[in-house]
Image (cartoon, grey):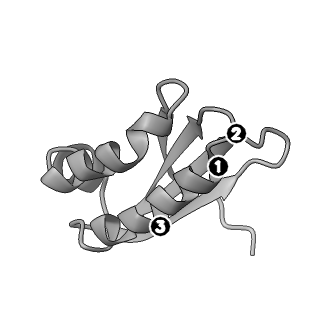
């Protein structure tokens, strides 16, 4: 499994509306090819910053299948207006499992 980690900084005082838009977008990820899981966490020390964590079967499920889909455009239409800058997106794969 591959994890997509996207750090998203939003405009001040838009947290409630942003979180509502993310909830509305959940079905877009549920039906995406190869999407295993999706969550978004708010960073405590930086309350206008979130970490979107999505589990994908393969890197291409994110970079090719989802990003090339109409659902990606719908995702960006729902949440893009809240962004204070370009999200920082990286991908990880497990190196060590502790417990």
The residue carrying pointer 1 sits among few (fewer than 14), some (14 to 19) or many (20 or more) residues within 10 Å by Cα, namely some
Marker disc for residue 23: 3
State the residue at coordinates (61%, 48%).
51
Secondary structure at numbered mark 3: helix
Badge 3 or badge 1: first in the primary sequence? 1
- Which residue carries the number 2 mark? 48
Residue 36 in the figure: left or right of residue 63: right
Q: Residue at x 29, y 65 (%)?
A: 28
Q: In the picture provided, is 58 more to the left or to the right than 19?
A: left
Contact between marks 1 and 2 (CB within 8 A): the answer is yes
Tell me which numbered mark, 1 or 2, is placed earlier along the sequence.
Answer: 1
Q: Position of residue 50 (x, y in %)?
A: 63, 46
Local secondary structure at mark 2: loop
Distance between the alpha carbons at the discs numbered 1 and 2: 7 Å
Q: Position of residue 19 (x, y in %)?
A: 56, 58
Q: Quadrant of residue 32?
A: bottom left
Q: Position of residue 66 (x, y in %)?
A: 22, 52
Q: Secondary structure at mark 1?
A: helix
Q: Which labelled disc corresponds to residue 15?
A: 1
Would residue 12 be found to the left or right of residue 81 on screen?
A: right
As measured in the structure, the alpha-carbon distance from the residue carrying label 3 to the one carrying label 1 is 12 Å
Is there any visible trace of residue 22 in the rendered image?
Answer: yes
Residue 16 position by quadrant? bottom right
The residue most toward the right is 45
């Amino acid at each position: 499994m591959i994890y997509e980690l996207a750090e998203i900084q939003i405009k001040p005082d838009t947290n409630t509306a942003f979180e509502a838009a993310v909830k509305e977008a959940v079905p877009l990820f549920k039906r995406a090819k190869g999407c295993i899981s999706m969550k978004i966490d708010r960073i405590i020390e930086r309350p206008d910053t979130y970490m979107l964590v999505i589990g994908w079967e393969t890197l291409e499920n994110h970079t090719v299948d989802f990003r090339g889909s109409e659902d990606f455009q719908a995702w960006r239409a729902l949440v893009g207006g809240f962004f204070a800058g370009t999200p920082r997106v990286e991908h990880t794969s497990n190196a060590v499992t502790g417990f």
